[in-house]
Amino acid sequence: ASSLQQVCEPSAHSNAGYEEYADVDWDNLGFGLMPTDYMYITKGTKDGLFEEGQLSRYGNIELSPSAGVLNYGQGLFEGTKAIRKEDGRLLLFRPDQNAIRMKIGAERMCMSSPSVDQFVDAVKQTALANNRWVPPPGKGSLYLRPLLMGSGPILGLAPAPEYTFLVYASPVGNYFKEGVAPLNLYVEDEFHRTSRGGAGGVKTITNYAPVLKALGRAKSRGFSDVLYLDSVNKKYIEEVSSCNIFIVKDDTISTPATNGTILEGVTRKSIIEIARALGYQVEERSIPVEELIDANEVFGTGTAVCVAQVGSITHQGKRVEYKTGDRSVCRELFSTLVGIQRGLIEDKMGWTVEI
Ligand code: COI
């Protein structure tokens, strides 16, 4: 069996020491919202004093029509996962990195934010409270979605006077409808994801709605997602709507440097470290779009997409195809990352948190 099969094949459908599963068709999870039992919620002042949060039943929240997030987009989100080990226990993957990224994003968006400890504790509480929604080993994960928003009322343009921090969860499988099949990307020439001096480097909600137009157009033409170019030179590859991007040429793996327009992905960072540990040379640099023509492989990384192989990229009517499959660099990196996340490969980096 290939290393991927060893890592990803479910353990003979065992309940993995856990008996209380929710009534879900675990074999057919995609990335659709499946409401779970509980969410965590707390409020903070603009000076950063956040109350001790509490779990409440998952459901609608009330907001003032003049909430900062609704009027001026003062909002951030995160994505992290709880994965069930073979023994039934749950593993989180580097939740502190999401907490730190939210703090950095909050600073950029003039928002107050919970402490790293409170963030990680909230993620733990939400995962454990929704334990029955965490898929059996090898069937997917519980995606945890922390949100930070300016919930206080404000009319003139200014930071909101109050903030809400919330974590909800949904069981998920593969992000793309293609499943694990290679993606077909479209390079966008008209729209850009973000611009120099903007907020592309942080996970603000305002980076996502603007790509829906290009994404919808590409999907209607049969593409899986869009690869954006930088807005200044319209020449360097930046990011995909849903994930960071890497290219492989011989033993060198390259990814756009984080210069303020690229999201500092937790999976991106982890894959860079894994690749270096496996002996690859990894370069973070500007990558001209022409380099896509000579690349051997291309893949995307993100919490939601994991490590997603790209089978083709189309730019200005030209389609380039890439190596995919079991013997690819992408597969090796994917298997190693997923192996660590599932507790099947020794976590020498100390990335996983058992709860
Ligand atoms: C994630 O990977 O967690 C994200 O937030 C990306 C989003 C487009 C689903």
Image: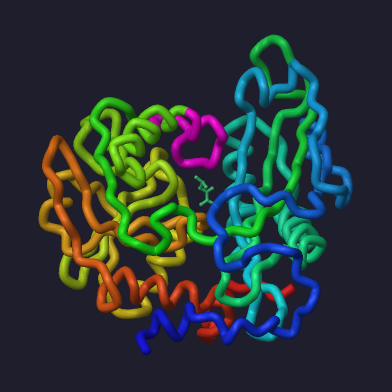
**Looking at the image, which residue is at 35% across and 38% down?**
219
Q: How is the image coloured?
A: rainbow
Q: Is the residue 81 above or below the residue 191 in the image? A: below
Q: Position of residue 201 (x, y in %)?
A: 46, 41
**Placement of the C terminus among the 4 image quadrants:** bottom right
Q: Position of residue 226 (x, y in %)?
A: 33, 41
In the displayed structure image, the side of residue 282 where residue 277 appears, left or right: right
- As drawn, the residue found furthest toward the bottom would be 1
In the displayed structure image, the side of residue 103 where residue 263 appears, left or right: left
The total number of labels drawn is 0
Please say whether residue 271 is one of the residues in the magenta stretch: no
Q: Is the residue 271 above or below the residue 33 in the image? A: below
Residue 196 visible in the picture: no
**Placement of the N terminus among the 4 image quadrants:** bottom left
**Looking at the image, which residue is at 54% across and 80% down?**
10
Quadrant of the rendered image containing residue 227: top left
**Looking at the image, which residue is at 62% across and 57% down?**
143
Residue 334 visible in the picture: yes
In the displayed structure image, the side of residue 353 where residue 216 appears, left or right: left
Asked whether 59 or 211 is in front, the reply is 59
Please say whether residue 194 is one of the residues in the magenta stretch: yes
**Looking at the image, which residue is at 80% across and 20% down?**
64
| Magenta stretch secondary structure, dominant | loop
Task: Identify the magenta region.
Answer: 193-209
Q: Position of residue 313 (x, y in %)?
A: 22, 48
Q: Position of residue 311 (x, y in %)?
A: 25, 58
